Image (cartoon, grey):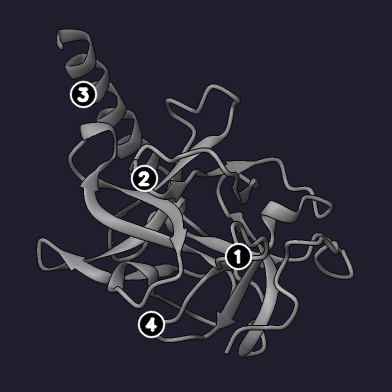
Amino acid sequence: MRLLSQRSRLLTFAILLGLLAGTLAVARPARAAGYGYWMIKSEVYGKCLSTNLATSPAGGVTHQVYLTTCNPATTHQWWQVNVGGLDDKVTSWVKDDGYYWELSANGSPLLGVEGIHAVYTARQSDVDGHKWTLGSGGPIEFINRSKYENTQWLLSASDQNPYAGGGYRVYTSKLRSPAAPAQWWVLTTQNSAGPPPCATCIVTPRS
């Protein structure tokens, strides 16, 4: 227990340092609003949002979400996003067990650390934790619909305490003004024509 508590304190300190360090000075052209398939890249780490079929630390029927090296040939790095969408879904390109899997968050502290909440994919649902608001500029913020502690929580990432395979952890953290570097994201295709075909992927865009 002492080791877990010490690790949690160190993780909290490292993540807070990562969130507070640096300023963002790069602006990019706005994206056209509407549904499309994108890779979602961390502005500060240059790695892409990915998912797999392993159970996330949130437990239950959830899948891991993490950052790893961007690769447009990887189906699990593509997402359907409504650019400029208000309280909309961010859906994995890959279906599993016949279900859509949506980027989701809840109010449970990640690894028991206060100030950061779990992010994962979960089967399609209309609960607030599955809904995000994002802008049409670049870089952009992903703001989760759910509110905790009377504030909004943003999609964030950290290179501290990565998964065993090296993937960076993804979580939500409190809205800041201005947003911290780890809370900024870029929609990209990595110069690809679009997501690769696969037998279990979304055939037509969701609306």
Which residue type carries mark 3? Arg
Q: Mark 1: which secondary structure?
A: loop
Q: Foreground mark, 3 or 1?
A: 1
**In the image, is 75 to the left or to the right of 11?**
right
Residue 176 sits in which quadrant?
bottom left
Identify the mark at residue 98; answer none if there is no mark. 1
Q: Mark 4: which secondary structure?
A: loop
Whichever of labels 3 and 1 marks the residue nearer the N terminus, that label is 3
> Residue sitting at 17 percent across and 18 percent down?
5
Of the 4 image quadrants, the one containing the N terminus is: top left
Q: Which residue is mark 4?
A: 87
Whichever of labels 4 and 3 marks the residue nearer the N terminus, that label is 3
Q: Mark 3: which secondary structure?
A: helix
Whichever of labels 1 and 2 marks the residue nearer the N terminus, that label is 2
CA gap between label 3 and label 1 equals: 40 Å
Q: Which residue is mark 2?
A: 19
Percent coordinates x, y for residue 11 in the rendering? 31, 27
Location of residue 21 with respect to 134 vertically, above or below: above
Location of residue 86 with respect to 6 vertically, above or below: below
Is the C-beta separation of discs 1 and 2 under 8 Å? no
